[in-house]
Image (cartoon, grey):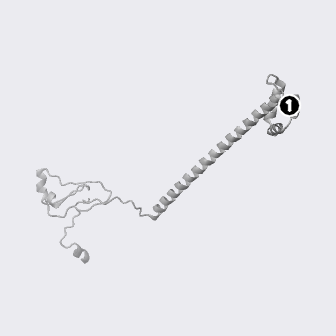
Amino acid sequence: MEDLEHMFHGVAVDGSTAYVPGQGEVLEVDDEEDDEEDNDGNDDSVTPATPVTPSSNGSLKRASSICTTAKSPKKTKLKSPALRTMNRFMANNERIQEERNKYLAAAVEAKISAKQSKEDVMFEKIKQVQHLAKECGVQESDPVQWLAVLRICQDPIVRDFFIATDTNEGSSAVIESFARV
């Protein structure tokens, strides 16, 4: 108790300067001198965000201001090691995801390109089979033989065999074989 008396010697501790963070109530300043000034229309009630100075209050008491006059710079540095670690993790994860998306896009593009190339090769082989069949004397107006050419085109092994046949007689034999089916 003696230490408290020593600490607050010469200071009026009446609770008028007390502040509870998060409490938005109006603080009342009670002064004996202010009772006379209340008749003048001056209101001594202040909100926690309103600074009160001794000169504006008309009192010689210490001001009950709870706000500061200077602004501190915005702090961008995170103090929590967990938050810093999480931010690094998220940035790393985002970078990895972007690389993965680029890789997947390239893989899809390559797959589409390969499929298109394969289809182009297949259509070229079909045209080649049709050309060789016409050289053997098959006409599009003969439905039996022309459908045999279609069956040859549908089977990749037979199609390649037909293209690889060197003579017209061999090609005609393949067409006749498929025409009988």
Task: Classify 164 as above or below 136.
Answer: below
The spot of residue 36 in percent (x, y) is 10, 56
Within the image, what quadrant is residue 120 found in?
top right
Within the image, what quadrant is residue 15 found in?
bottom left
Task: Classify 123 as above or below 7.
Answer: above
Dot 1 falls on a residue whose secondary structure is helix
Task: Classify 169 as above or below 28.
Answer: above
Within the image, what quadrant is residue 1 found in?
bottom left
Quadrant assignment for the C terminus: top right
- Asked whether 66 or 149 is in front, the reply is 149
The spot of residue 108 in percent (x, y) is 63, 45
For the point 23% across and 74% down, the residue is 7
Q: How many marks?
A: 1
Q: Amino acid at mark 1?
A: Ile
Task: Classify 89 as above or below 173.
Answer: below
Mark 1 nearby-residue class (10 Å; few <14, some 14–19, many ≥20): many
- Residue, disc 1: 175
Which residue, as the protein is rendered here, is positioned at the far bottom? 2
The spot of residue 86 in percent (x, y) is 49, 60
For the point 13% across and 53% down, the residue is 38
- Asked whether 42 or 107 is in front, the reply is 107
